[in-house]
Image (cartoon, rainbow, N blue to C red):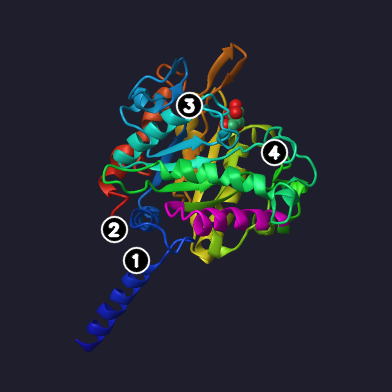
């Protein structure tokens, strides 16, 4: 009896610890905290499928209300919806992939109303040169940090991000929680914030400055923060630019089936190694692991979803996997799509992937009521 009491008591303590646990933003809204807890719980249920710009356009269509390539193929929406803020900072009405920001806000509200998860990336321009995110001019990160010549400019850019986030509200006026994924692929050399273009310490300061400005100065409290590398080869490399546990909620990396992971077998092998490392970092640091971007452009393998992708991800605990955007065909040889569309070669197999018990789509997560404890 007494032992049973102690056992039940310790279970209660464990349960309390889990629900008392807070994300990086200790003042996060209750919906954001609920999402944070539920994402952790869902790690035991399966992997949510996500798709960038899913509601905005697909292969051969743009801005058709309610449409989604994923829905065309499976009858259901993805569980996670990625959108992109690039060019918001320079007051453009449309982002760098031609999605109008006002439409983006409606898509976000629509996805949230269905109980979906929202994540935002930001390919922000280079503040030092005025060129794009892909302009790795030396000294850019230093120029953005406090006392740098572009710090004031950068703050005005963050003001615009904050204004965008304040405009995301649900039906009861609550702020819509968002997984914010700034400075992604931060170990690669192609973005001004990445790899050899700044020191690891500068990147950490940039991440921390950005987060504390949004959270503590602007009082944005509907964000979970994602730390996001590209491919990596060791735990040390993965953590080299990590800003610290107190700044991060979600940890992830991006991987495409291309270059040195172009074959199915290499993709399974390399992503498996990275996912194993990610899982162990997530467990040690109590973070939410995610495959923050993935894709096999053109999907030229009719069984890719079950024979390659599922084999690559199923052994691991991952909150979600976000397929990159279906921008479509420019001509027969020039195309960009990472999810199937109706009639596409891998569409049939994608339905099998959808039916697999490991994968979660909109209908699965709606039941979980992710924004309530
Ligand atoms: C890249 C490509 C580009 C796009 C950019 C930002 O991976 O999809 O076409 O402009 O992401 O979304």
Residue that badge 3 annotates: 100
* Image quarter (top left, top right, bottom left or bottom right) of the N terminus: bottom left
First of labels 4, 1 by sequence position: 1
In this rendering, position of residue 70 left or right of residue 181: left
What whole-number distance in Å separates the C-alpha atoms at marks 3 and 2?
A: 33 Å
**Position in image of residue 318 (x %, y %):** 46, 50
Closer to us: 361 or 165: 165
Residue designated by label 2:
373
Circle number at residue 19:
1
Q: Which of marks 4 and 3 is nearer the N terminus?
A: 3
Instruction: Give residue 265's quadrant in the image.
Output: top right
In three-dimensional space, the C-alpha distance between marks 4 and 1, rounded to whole angstroms, equals 40 Å
Q: Give the range drawn in magenta.
A: 202-223
Residue appearing at x 76%, y 54% in the figure? 199
Q: Earlier in the sequence, mark 2 or mark 4?
A: 4
Regarding residue 160, the answer to whether it shows in the image is yes
Marks 4 and 3 close (CB-CB < 8 Å):
no
Q: Do the residues labelled 1 and 2 touch (CB within 8 Å)?
A: yes
* Front tag of 3 and 2: 3
Q: Which of 137 and 296 is in front in this view?
A: 137
Separation of disc 1 and disc 2 at Cα?
8 Å
Q: Earlier in the sequence, mark 1 or mark 2?
A: 1
């Amino acid at each position: 009896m007494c032992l049973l009491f102690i056992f039940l008591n310790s279970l209660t303590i464990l349960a309390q610890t889990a629900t008392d646990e807070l994300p990086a933003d200790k003042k996060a809204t209750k919906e954001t905290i609920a999402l944070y807890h539920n994402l952790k719980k869902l790690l035991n249920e399966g992997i949510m499928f996500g798709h960038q710009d899913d509601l905005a356009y697909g292969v051969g269509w743009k801005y058709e209300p309610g449409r989604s390539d994923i829905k065309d193929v499976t009858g259901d929406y993805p569980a996670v919806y990625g959108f992109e803020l690039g060019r918001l900072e320079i007051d453009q009405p449309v982002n760098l992939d031609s999605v109008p920001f006002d439409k983006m806000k409606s898509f976000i509200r629509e996805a949230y109303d269905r109980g979906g998860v929202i994540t935002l990336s930001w390919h922000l321009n280079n503040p030092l040169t005025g060129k794009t995110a892909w302009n790795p001019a030396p000294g850019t990160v230093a120029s953005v940090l406090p006392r740098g010549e572009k710090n004031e400019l950068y703050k005005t850019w963050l003001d615009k991000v904050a204004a965008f986030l304040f405009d995301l509200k649900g039906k009861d006026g609550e702020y819509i929680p968002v997984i914010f994924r700034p400075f992604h692929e931060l170990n690669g050399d192609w973005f001004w914030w990445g790899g050899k273009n700044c020191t690891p310490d500068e990147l950490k300061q940039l991440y921390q400055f950005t987060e504390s400005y949004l959270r503590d100065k602007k009082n944005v409290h509907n964000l979970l923060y994602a730390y996001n590398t590209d491919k990596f080869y060791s735990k040390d490399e993965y953590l080299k630019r990590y800003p610290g546990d107190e700044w991060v909620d979600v940890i992830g990396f991006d991987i495409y089936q291309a270059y040195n992971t172009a074959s199915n077998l290499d993709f399974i092998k390399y992503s498996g190694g990275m996912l194993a490392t990610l899982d162990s970092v997530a467990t040690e640091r109590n973070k939410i692991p995610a495959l923050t971007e993935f894709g096999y452009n053109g999907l030229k393998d009719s069984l890719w979803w079950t024979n390659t992708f599922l084999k690559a991800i199923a052994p691991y605990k991952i909150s979600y996997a976000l397929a990159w955007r279906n921008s479509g065909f420019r001509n027969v040889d020039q195309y960009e799509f990472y999810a199937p569309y109706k009639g596409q070669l891998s569409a049939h197999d994608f339905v099998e992937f959808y039916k697999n018990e490991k994968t979660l789509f909109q209908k699965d997560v709606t039941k979980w009521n992710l924004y309530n404890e």
